[in-house]
């Protein structure tokens, strides 16, 4: 069974930094994409950053502030967040899309809270 375990969330002041980690275990298929989404209260879940097809994509709101990376040997995906703003406050979810041939399987972590406050 595929499991995603996130860590690294917390409280931080504006301008601060945090690094989120997500360890993926139990995968038997190839990885198609790995990334991070977030959901703020009263809002829909949105893409933050993703590694897909060897490249990376970011939401416009986090470009030049957040960096997504992975360590394949550790089956871990990271999100380095810098210059944090109050509007970055949300629950952050790790997502991995595995592929068995042409069939994709999407898995989610349990979420980790990030709160940016003065």
Image (cartoon, rainbow, N blue to C red):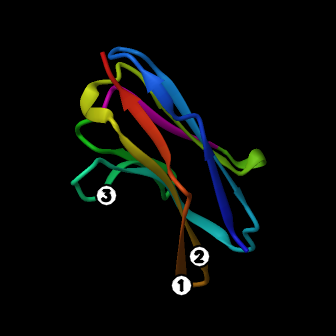
Q: Which element carries disc 2, helix, strand or loop?
A: strand
Q: Which element carries disc 1, helix, strand or loop?
A: loop
Identify the residue position indicated by label 1 in the image.
102
- Where is residue 28? Give x, y as percent: 75, 73
Check contact, mark 1 vs mark 2: CB within 8 A. yes
1 to the left or right of 103: right
Residue 68 inside the magenta-drawn segment: yes
- Report the quarter where the N terminus lies: bottom right
Mark 1 or mark 3: which comes first in sequence?
A: 3
Circle 2: is it few (<14), some (14-19), or many (20+) Cα within 10 Å? some
- Where is residue 115? Give x, y as percent: 39, 31
Circle 3: is it few (<14), some (14-19), or many (20+) Cα within 10 Å? some
- Where is residue 39? Give x, y as percent: 33, 51
Residue 96 inside the magenta-drawn segment: no
Identify the residue position indicated by label 2 in the image.
99
The residue range painted magenta reads: 62-70
CA gap between label 2 and label 3 equals 23 Å
Query: Residue 114 lies in what quarter of the image?
Result: top left
The image shows a total of numbered marks equal to 3
Which residue: 30% across, 15% down?
A: 118
Residue nearer the viewer, 115 or 85: 115
CA gap between label 1 and label 3 equals 26 Å
Identify the residue position indicated by label 3 in the image.
45
52 to the left or right of 21: left
């Amino acid at each position: 069974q595929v499991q995603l375990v996130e860590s690294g969330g917390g409280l931080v002041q504006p301008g601060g930094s945090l690094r989120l980690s997500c360890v993926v275990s139990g995968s038997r298929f190839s990885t198609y994409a790995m990334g991070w989404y977030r959901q703020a209260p009263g809002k829909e879940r949105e893409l933050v950053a993703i590694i897909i097809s060897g490249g990376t994509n970011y939401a416009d709101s986090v470009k030049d502030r957040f960096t997504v990376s992975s360590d394949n040997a550790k089956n871990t995906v990271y999100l380095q967040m810098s210059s944090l703003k109050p509007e970055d406050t949300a629950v952050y979810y790790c997502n991995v899309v595995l592929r068995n041939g042409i069939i994709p399987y999407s898995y989610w972590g349990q979420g980790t809270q990030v709160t940016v406050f003065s």
